[in-house]
Structures are given as C-alpha cells and as structure tokens.
Amino acid sequence: MPDSSKFAGQSLELLLSRDQIRQAVEDMAAQLSERFRGKCPILIGVLNGSFIFMADLVRALDIDFEVDFIKISSYGSDTASTGTVRLLKDISADITGRDVIVVEDIVDTGLTIKFLRNRMQEAGPTSVTFISLLLKDEVAKLDFPLDYVGFNIPDRFVVGYGLDVDQKLRGLGPIYAFKEN
Ligand code: IMP
C-alpha cells in the first residue's frame, strides 16, 4: 500500500469510497445488461485509466459480451489537458455492424470522448453507447450526451481506481481528489 495521504507534497482527500464506487458500477452493469440482453456488445476500454473500472463492470454484467481496448493520450505528465489527442493503440476488433460500448474512466474536457466518437463512427457500428465512471460536468463541453455516468464530480484532479497522476496511484481502491490549497 503506497503512502497515499501525500503525493508530491500535495494532500489527498477522499472523494468516493469503495462502497460508493461498487454500488455505481453494479447499477450501471444492471442497466447495460437490461439494454443489451440477447445481443453481444463489444466493450471498448480506454487505456490506461479504465482498466479497473472495465474489470469490475464486466464482472457485474450478466449478458454475453466481448472486450477490446484503445489507447489514447491527451495528457502529458502534467495534470492539465494538452488540448491534443493522440491515438497510441487502435482497437483490434472489427466493430462494423456491432453494438459498441465505450468505457471511459473520466471525462474532463470531453476532447478524448469526441475523438473516440469519430473513430467509432468511421467503422459503421450498429450502435455506440458511452459510459464513464466520472464526469467533470462543469468542464466538459460535449455536443452529445453520455449514456451512463457514475458520478458528476467537481473540477478537481482525482486519482485512484485506475486514475493516475504521472502514472502513479492507480492502485488505490477509493477515489481521492488533490486537496485545494
Ligand atoms: P479529456 O480529453 O479532457 O476529457 O480527458 C480525458 C482523459 O484525461 C481521461 O481519460 C484521463 O486519462 C485524463 N484525466 C482527466 N481528468 C483526470 C483526473 O482528474 N485525474 C486523472 N486523469 C484525468
């Protein structure tokens, strides 16, 4: 267990407990199972941040599904968006004619999810559904709605449950926010 109370001199404050996260993931999995019953959607996890959310979400589904991953970079090693999105690893699956569920850990400015939407639509899927565990709703400028959101959170930098700062602290069970000074 890393010393998570301080990172690079900054203090962390609990934002979402393990129980709150578990409940939200189960609720969203139940809704997805209902909506895609009898179909076999392909869930596309956005690396790296979504790997823990994805693992918990798929284990709470009770329908057939497939998984794939895409890797995007919109941040450098800093905590602010660089404003550009780069595709680091594309999906391997053929999603033409498939029901696609894009699984994001967090939507901040919305740049990444817009990029993903365009990438998915190019391939002619039957449907594209967006799910994000977290949404910074005061910041995100989206011209389309997300289908499922676990929590709307304030405009603060958060870590844990797959989310990192400079590649660290992804393994924390709860989600923490950097304390405002
Ligand atoms: P967007 O393109 O600005 O919406 O940012 C999306 C990506 O930035 C996410 O997939 C995360 O990888 C990263 N990100 C945004 N906000 C945070 C945060 O508070 N903590 C950790 N990563 C974040």
Image (spheres, helix red, strand yellow):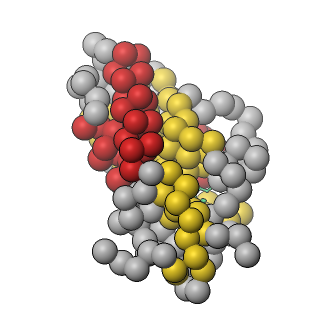
Residue 60 position by quadrant: top left
Question: Residue 174, how many percent across, how many down?
Answer: 43, 57
Q: Identify the residue at horizontal 43%, vertical 71% (top origin).
A: 169
The reply to whether residue 96 is in sight is: no
Q: Identify the residue at horizontal 60%, vertical 33% (top origin).
A: 146
Q: Nearer the viewer, residue 11 or 164?
A: 11
Quadrant of picture, ligand 1: bottom right
The reply to whether residue 54 is in sight is: yes
Q: Quarter of the image containing the N terminus?
A: bottom left
Q: Is residue 54 left or right of residue 109?
A: left
Q: Nearer the viewer, residue 54 or 41?
A: 54
Question: Residue 99, how many percent across, how many down?
Answer: 40, 25
Q: Identify the residue at horizontal 28%, vertical 29% (top origin).
A: 61
Q: Is residue 88 left or right of residue 80?
A: left
Question: Residue 136, how many percent across, how many down?
Answer: 67, 49
Whether 170 is drawn above or below 60: the answer is below
Q: Is residue 61 left or right of residue 75?
A: left
Farthest residue to the bottom: give it.
9
Q: How many marks?
A: 0
Residue 81 position by quadrant: bottom right
Farthest residue to the top: give it.
38
Q: Identify the residue at horizontal 52%, vertical 72% (top origin).
A: 165
Q: Quarter of the image containing the C terminus?
A: bottom right
Whether 68 is drawn above or below 156: the answer is above
